[in-house]
Amino acid sequence: MSNKDPPSPPNFPAVQKDKEEEQQEEHEPLPLDWTKLGEQGDHHDLPIRFPSDVYEISKSPDETDLCIVGTAGQKITRIGNNFWKECSPNLTSLVLRSHLITKMEGLSGFEYLTTLELYDNAVEKLEDLNSSEGGFPGKTLLIMDMSYNSIRDMSPVSFCPNLVELYLAQNKLKTMTGLSQLKKLRKLDLGANRLRVMEEDELSGLENLEELWLGKNKITEVGGLDKLTKLRRLDLQANRLTVVENLTAQKETLEELYLSHNNIGNRGASQPTGLALNFTKLTTLDLSRNRIANTTIFAHLVHLEDLWLSGNKITTFEDVAPLSVNHWEKEEGSDCEFRKGCPQLETLYLEYNPVADDTDYRRKLSELIPSLTQIDANMISTSSFAYPIDQAASGYLDDLETSMREKQATAIELAKSQMMKKSSEDD
């Protein structure tokens, strides 16, 4: 098993008054320093550069992909109204990543475009997706990535009914709109926006959705998921959740659940429609940086392989014991005991909990939960002391041990031979 590290979203911001927060966000810069445009209107002073000014574009019908990345050299500031005329008529993939483009234009003539990526620009509106008579390029798009821009309205995504993947992370969205007709969508990323509500009217139409990423928003309640019966991954990190609930429809499908950097305690995590459910496929659960005090609420999740609880309030090894298959509990209202625990648990993060201050922390954990192969960021050895070693060192030590055993066997055989020879000489 490879060394696994939990995702690390930015620190959860303190809750402030809505008006103050909105005013502050209005002046937030774009995420990368070199794309800062300052106050609105500054981009008009930038030199005009079209794609053909920074890259030699081929019109050959054999060309199907065009990728121009602006991380080095000159950056595009305008696409141009007739951009499609400068490109191959058979273009299927267009990537203009990390430039200073503010307007979507010149796309209407692309009749075969399936992938459109304008990641990390300064685009303010989703447009030119349906301006042609045939509805191009919207109706042919399968993947659209408009993350790291300044988009406030996502409703034009409704012009892209065949989308399979949609990425709109790190924009300025306050509401979910235009999603309800995207029946083929499998992956949706709206992380790092300003969303407050998981809107059921929009989400309920996503019947084939498998991944939903909503981290770093302002969501206070899990909801709108009743129709998402194929959901495998759900990310709600760095929001304002205190309760985990309304996951009944995902009981048979959910594999990964990310809830770090919220304000969830044991009571909020143990709701009947939340983590109290017997998820049949849940292997990864992240509740780092919350208010979890013990692991009793996870003991029934028998398929868990990775559990991330860094930065919580777990104090003693007794608080961790429910994860062990050797742990027994009394059934409520009865004297009968039953075995609980997570028999498949391999990775456990408990760093930045009080329990991690114990000088014998890793050894005690490995003895308590023998199935563990990784504690925090460290792989553990198979020895009884369970000292942390990295994977390269592990292979080296295995080879060294084998070599030592071979040398020992050779030495023993040599000693026996010498003793027999001496005995023969004495006779």
Image (cartoon, rainbow, N blue to C red):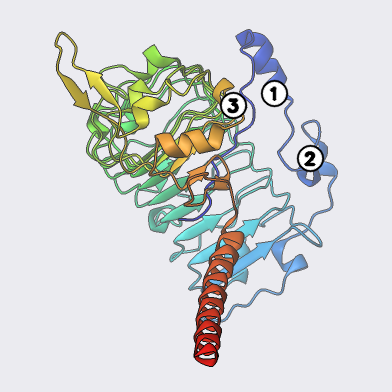
Determine the secondary structure under disc 2.
Answer: loop
Give the left or right position of residue 205, taking residue 198 as reference.
left
| Residue 42 at x, y percent in the picture | 82, 37
Which mark sits nearer the N-terminus, 3 or 1? 1
Q: Quadrant of residue 147?
A: top right
Q: Which residue is mark 1?
A: 26
Q: Crowding at label 1, few (<14), some or many (≥20) Cα neighbours within 10 Å?
A: few
Give the left or right position of residue 102, taking residue 315 as reference.
right
Q: Are marks 1 and 2 in contact (CB under 8 Å)?
A: no
Q: Which residue is mark 2?
A: 36
Cα distance between the residues tagged 3 and 1: 46 Å
Q: Amino acid at mark 2?
A: Lys
Which mark sits nearer the N-terminus, 2 or 3? 2
Number of the front mark, 2 or 3: 3
Q: Which residue is mark 3?
A: 358
| Residue 242 at x, y percent in the picture | 45, 15
